[in-house]
Image: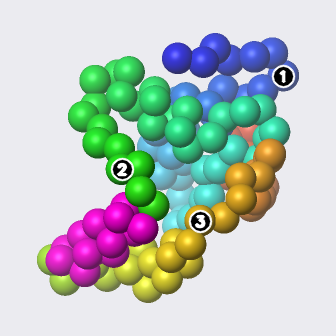
Amino acid sequence: MQEVREGVFPWVLRVPVGNFAISSLAVTAGHLTYNPVNPHSDGIDLDTVVGWLADSGEEIATVDDYDHWYRLFSDSLAHLPEMQRRHSLILLVHNYIQTIPPVNGGVVNAPRFFEAVSWATV
């Protein structure tokens, strides 16, 4: 597992810390939606996070062929029960038809999440 480096916020690196931040923010007044993403160019990508999950004992199956993965993913979404399907990525699945080049850094910002976590001293 990759170590936290100085100057990098651990809440964007560790899944348990991210869970703690989200659950801490969930009990505050009002209803807000956050994008807990990693906006930093720190080498932490989805493969790293999946590796952490595998290292923690989660059963992870990888699919090497992207087209095959996409078919499995879209078919799985289509076969979810109606309530789960409504809250899934099914309406956005077309965005995943083709791979996109990797980006060194975040492609979206998460200023509200960063501000809320900073304010809540999570």
Q: Is residue 80 above or below residue 37?
A: below
Q: Is residue 49 above or below residue 69?
A: above
- Picture quarter containing residue 110? bottom right
User: Relative to residue 2, is residue 6 drawn left or right?
Assistant: right
- Picture quarter containing residue 21? top right
User: Relative to residue 31, is residue 82 drawn left or right?
Assistant: left
Residue 81 seen in the figure: yes
Which type of secondary structure does the marked residue at label 2 adopt?
loop
> 122 or 85, which is in the foreground?
85
User: Relative to residue 77, is residue 48 drawn left or right?
Assistant: right
* Residue named by callout 1: 7
Q: Position of residue 113 (x, y in %)?
A: 68, 52
Residue for point 79% across, 41% down: 40
Mark drawn on residue 99: 3
Residue 84 seen in the figure: no
* Residue named by callout 2: 63
